[in-house]
Image (cartoon, grey):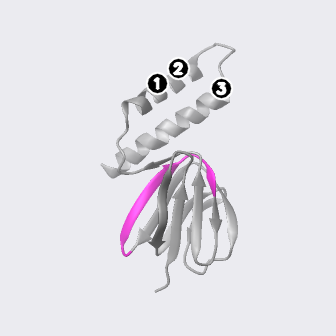
Amino acid sequence: MKKLTFSFISPERPIVQNQEADFVALPAFEGEMGVLPGHVNSVVILMPGFVRFKNNGEEKEFAIIDGFAEVFKDHIDVFASEASLSEEKQSEEQKQRLERAKKALSSQDADIDIELAEIQLKTQILKMKMKKRKM
């Protein structure tokens, strides 16, 4: 059976490099998008959600906030501004970020960047959902 080559890159680090995959699911702007070998070439805008890839029955999952994917017949490259592997533990720093984002959104301070606080809150909530899904 044909395979895709899958790479997943974030600004912090490459998360997956040239991994074989039978199937990749993306949280696309229009809804979840499945990619199989031989898929039509495209560029896909990614929304907050989960990127999943399967290889030989084993599935891995990542939480992302946003990004894009370049899809080709035989490979797919995913670029995310922030990503979290399902196996990664939620750090104390991530918990503190969640609390800061909640406080910023509930604050009446005019100097608070509401849009940034909302993004940070969504990021931390998504990471927490990822942890709960794996428990």
Confirm whether the magenta stretch covers residue 97. no
In the structure shown, which secondary structural element does the residue marked by tag 2 occupy? helix
Residue 103: which numbered mark, if any? 2
* 45 with respect to 132 (left or right): right
Q: How far apart are marks 1 and 2 (CA)?
A: 6 Å
In the structure shown, which secondary structural element does the residue marked by tag 3 occupy? helix
- Give how far across and how far down residue 35 sits, in percent: 56, 71
Residue 99: which numbered mark, if any? 1
The local crowd at label 3, few if under 14, some if 14 to 19, many if 20 or more residues have their Cα within 10 Å, is some
Q: Looking at the image, which residue is at 68% across and 16% down?
A: 111
Does the magenta stretch mainly form a helix, a strand or a loop?
Answer: strand
- Give how far across and how far down residue 78 sits, in percent: 58, 59
Q: What is the magenta range?
A: 56-68
Confirm whether the magenta stretch covers residue 59. yes
Quarter of the view holding residue 110: top right
Q: What residue type is labelled 2?
A: Lys
Quarter of the view holding residue 105: top right
Q: Looking at the image, which residue is at 50% across and 23% down?
A: 100
The relative height of residue 49 versus residue 74 in the rendered view (above or below) is above
Q: Distance between the residues labelled 3 and 2?
A: 11 Å
In the structure shown, which secondary structural element does the residue marked by tag 1 occupy? helix
Residue closer to the observer: 31 or 90 = 90
Q: What residue type is labelled 3?
A: Ile
Is the residue under label 2 in contact with that under label 1 (CB below 8 Å)? yes
